[in-house]
Image (spheres, coloured by chain):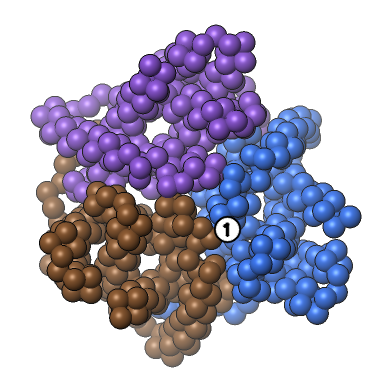
Chain colours: A blue, B purple, C brown
Amino acid sequence: MLDSFIYISDLVGVITCAISGVLVATRLRMDPFGILVLAGVTGIGGGTLRDMMMGSTPVFWITDNTYIYVIIVTAILSVFLINRIHRFPAYLLPIFDAFGLSIFTIIGAQKALMFGFSGTVAIVMGCITGVVGGMIRDILSGQIPFVLQKEVYATASILGATLYVVCDYIQLGSILSMSIAMLGTLSLRLCAIYFHLSLPVFESDK
Amino acid sequence: MLDSFIYISDLVGVITCAISGVLVATRLRMDPFGILVLAGVTGIGGGTLRDMMMGSTPVFWITDNTYIYVIIVTAILSVFLINRIHRFPAYLLPIFDAFGLSIFTIIGAQKALMFGFSGTVAIVMGCITGVVGGMIRDILSGQIPFVLQKEVYATASILGATLYVVCDYIQLGSILSMSIAMLGTLSLRLCAIYFHLSLPVFESDK
Amino acid sequence: MLDSFIYISDLVGVITCAISGVLVATRLRMDPFGILVLAGVTGIGGGTLRDMMMGSTPVFWITDNTYIYVIIVTAILSVFLINRIHRFPAYLLPIFDAFGLSIFTIIGAQKALMFGFSGTVAIVMGCITGVVGGMIRDILSGQIPFVLQKEVYATASILGATLYVVCDYIQLGSILSMSIAMLGTLSLRLCAIYFHLSLPVFESDK
């Protein structure tokens, strides 16, 4: 039951992230295989780095090829859909990205706790898993990464992972803890997008 | 015999990639050690990521220093040559890059099969090994990565790795399979450069 | 004694690198958690890649959370300080960066030798440990990485690591070797900053 919940959440995260990759790729007029590469990087980049850091190798998509097939199917369907619809509202990209961010943050934190690492490491690992896929997508496509822009992004990931670690600590039950934390992260990020929220900014003059 | 074939191919890939790194570095007016860094990143970046993902650590160039020496010698010779010739035709970079792409793609796929991973993983791993070195080179030097440009690049890598996996599956013999797939990848990419081939592009309006 | 020396040096490197990350982040008007992310990436990015390449996983900051706390405290203190002072001289960034480069280069080379790898590998590993954190910081923030600019940077790292390997080879004693090599690297880099030193540049016409 828990395993299924995690597995399905993870695949949903991969799908939403892959779509965000396709959206960026089509803006850049990439060819179908280039689109596939960007969808793949965004979908499994964060989890790959997480696994390499924790020493959980071969990384997850090597031992379970489902992830690769899900990305291929997602990329093909998205491209067909985009070819039909032609004009996408600009807010689709941050929304798909927000789903990926929320799910991957909690999945990453959960995996770290499951490996017996501390709550602090779980928060960092959640943040890395959530942020890195989109970060590579943005760097590859020459854009300023979402995580460096003003709207609550790293904040949502760090607070969401912290919420999960707290829920787990007070033994709320794994599925409940993960659901609360995913919804919390997602709500925070979506509110930030909708209301153009941002934390106070610290800047030096130079 | 097979081992020698793989080893020599791998070193040729490192040399051609290192030269592509030197070509980019000299355009950017880097100093000799900066050139060496860019040559190294391009030459062994892809294989390093591949080994880390597969859990084949310490990565290959740590256990066999030949790779480091080959990069140093290549960088020194290239710099001397460039200082003599002064003016390089612009098409040299994509051509050296194409050799590295072709060789590393097949080497990466072969190593994945040898580790007992599935054909699907072998194709992904081949693509990562082939593409990542040049990708880091381009990101570091502030250029749009080759893989994101229109001309058949990720396509050549993915189709080439697929060709290798098929040849291996029908048991053509390792050296023959690798040669066919390397030549196939290289031809496809060189044709794309020469004829400015590109696949149809999917784009959204925004 | 040796362990303490290495540990304290490493933490000083993390602090100076984290400060350099904060300095870049505040220029980009990032929010507090974004600043934390950039401080973290710069502070532990190089060592993380080093550990993943050597197969020393889980990476160091997973098994010793002190590094994470040090980064959090450094980021908070730096932000408060920046808010008070408002105007920072532009040369602070390269100077903090230089401290991180020097310390991490030697720590990386030392760890490689301790793992029983060759002197050549130690030099490469030192260079990677020293350079990569700042490299990711610069790429994320859309700037040309320090390592690709003209002033002696990769040069300082490579020569410093070489100096350490030589000192270690002639058995000068670990702490003495590390101190000499760190000071050598730091002096070289600071001189390069101060006198705008650069090695002769090789460039092609195109």
Image height of B150 relative to C195, above or below: above
Look at the image and tell me in which quarter the N terminus of chain C lies.
bottom left
Q: Position of residue B133 (x, y in %)?
A: 42, 38
Residue drawn at x 23%, y 74% as measured from the top left: C175
Q: Nearer the viewer, residue B2 or A67?
A: B2
Amino acid identity at mark 1: Met
Q: Quadrant of residue A108?
A: bottom right
Q: Along the line of sight, which residue is nearer the eye, C178 or A133?
A: C178
Vertical comparison of B63 with C85: above or below: above
| Above/below status of B90 relative to A42 | above
Q: Tell me if I can see residue A202 in this picture.
A: no
Element class at badge 1: helix
Numbered-mark total: 1
Q: Chain of mark 1?
A: A
State which quadrant residue B137 falls in. top left
| Left or right of A77 in this view: A149 | left
B11 vs A37, nearest the viewer: B11
Label 1 neighbour load within 10 Å: few <14, some 14-19, many 20+: many
The percent coordinates of residue C29 (x first, y second) are: 50, 72
Residue C19: x %, y % from top left:
40, 76
Indicate the quadrant where residue A173 lies.
Answer: bottom right
Residue C189 vertical placement versus A28 (above, below)? below
Residue at the spot 75% in from the left edge and 71% down from the top edge: A164
At 70% from the left edge and 74% from the top edge, which residue is drawn?
A162
Q: Quadrant of the C terminus of chain C?
A: top left
Does residue A15 appear in this view? Answer: yes
Q: Residue furthest right?
A: A1
Q: Position of residue B105 (x, y in %)?
A: 48, 27
Q: Nearer the viewer, residue B143 or A176?
A: A176
Residue drawn at (67%, 40%), measured in percent from left and top?
A63
Q: Which residue, given by chain and number where applicable, does mark 1 sit on?
A: A54
